[in-house]
Image: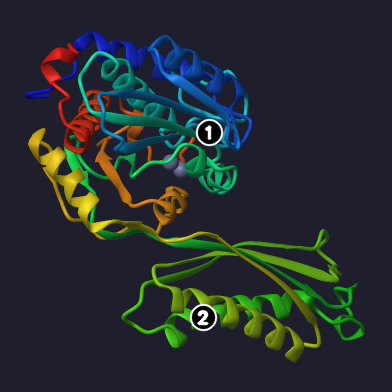
Amino acid sequence: MNNSPVSAGAVNNAIEWRHFLHAIPEIAFNEKETAAFVSNKLRSFGFKIDTGYAGTGIVGSISKGTSSRTIGLRADMDALPILETAELPYRSKNTGMMHACGHDGHMAILLGAASLVSRVEFDGTIRFIFQPAEENEGGAKKMIEDGLFEDLPVDAVFGLHNWPQLPIGAFVANPGPIMAAFSIFNIEIRGKGAHGAMPHQGVDPVVAGCAVVSALQSVVSRNVSPLDTVVLSTTQIHAGDAYNIIPDRIVIRGTGRWFSEEPGMLLQSRLHKIASDVASAYGCEATVRYEPRYPVTVNDAYYARCAQDVADKLGMSVTQSAPSMGSEDFAFMLQAVPGAYAWLGSEKSFNNAPLHSPQFDFNDDLIPHGIAYWLGLIENQLGGTDGEKAT
Ligand SMILES: [Zn+2]
Ligand SMILES: [Zn+2]
């Protein structure tokens, strides 16, 4: 990478840490060994450590100069419940768990920046935030509920994610919405079980459930404005155990995604109405559980521009991209404090596997770009970081 302020030694250390972390993946709120590794590293760099936020969450803070200005840089620590199939020398030692989203790389990048920032000049305070449970379980929300920003306030907060769909050097931090809100739903439809040969003696929840799944397709196509972006996907159907038995219940599950509040509320109300009324038309009863999980991830316009300026100065290719229908619990941090979330192109991984694939492996070529981005952002926000001194 041209004009990189990041030394080869620092990159090699970060790669070594990434491989170590890859081998010890841990799932939401159980990132104990991972957290111990992170806090030992931060302590060795001379940071003040605060722990106990969302259980395994860690914040390493470092101050210099006289300014009270403070920024937060966040990495996620959790892995996924996936059986790793890639034959890597540093493959997962924890069967059934793996870093399939590259959070091992995010931690290594942030630790790499931390290892260099202790030796450079800036004016203010930087908080290196390592959060548990980004995947589904809202570790960022829990950290905030546990008093993160009251105890350890920041003026702005920043996050990043590796993005295999984009080439190395590509950088996206759109102002405004960048990732969707998401909800989950669970519909249980109860009928009356019967012999498969004598359906008239029962009330078939399978036929009712299939009608509900079909009717749900009308929500996005008929109820949501064509100008709004919304997804409603049924992803699970569970019913029955035998060829010749009509079961007494069926469970249907799925997820909704949206970018603005009105269609988000509409999904909830239509889901309840369709499930209960369609089930009733078939003589069944439906119970709907609907849980909004993460809000929309919204970048502050000013801080998104700061992030883009930093990337541009580093020679990255700053592009405007369509937002993703994926979701991110950094959204909760951006609701509490203004800031920006960025995608850094990581181009490929082992076997070109996408995020969340059992073959996925974070691309180490991103590490120098990621460290340079964090150091550049510190310079942009707190001034005085001299990249040359960081080697
Ligand atoms: Zn993920
Ligand atoms: Zn992720």
Q: Give whichever of 225, 119 is nearer the camera.
A: 119
x, y percent for residue 211:
64, 81
Structural crowding at the residue carrying mark 1, measured as other residues with C-alpha within 10 Å and reported as few (<14), some (14–19) or many (≥20): many
What's the mark number on residue 79? Answer: 1
Asked which quadrant contains residue 60, the reply is top left
Badge 2 element: helix
Residue 314 vs 197, above or below: the answer is above
Distance between the alpha carbons at the discs numbered 1 and 2: 33 Å
Residue 359 appears in the rendering: no
Q: Amino acid at mark 2?
A: Leu
x, y percent for residue 390:
19, 14
Structural crowding at the residue carrying mark 2, measured as other residues with C-alpha within 10 Å and reported as few (<14), some (14–19) or many (≥20): some
Q: Residue furthest bottom?
A: 281
Of callouts 1 and 2, the N-terminal one: 1
Badge 1 element: loop
24 displayed left or right of 357: right
Residue displayed at 47% across by 52% down: 332
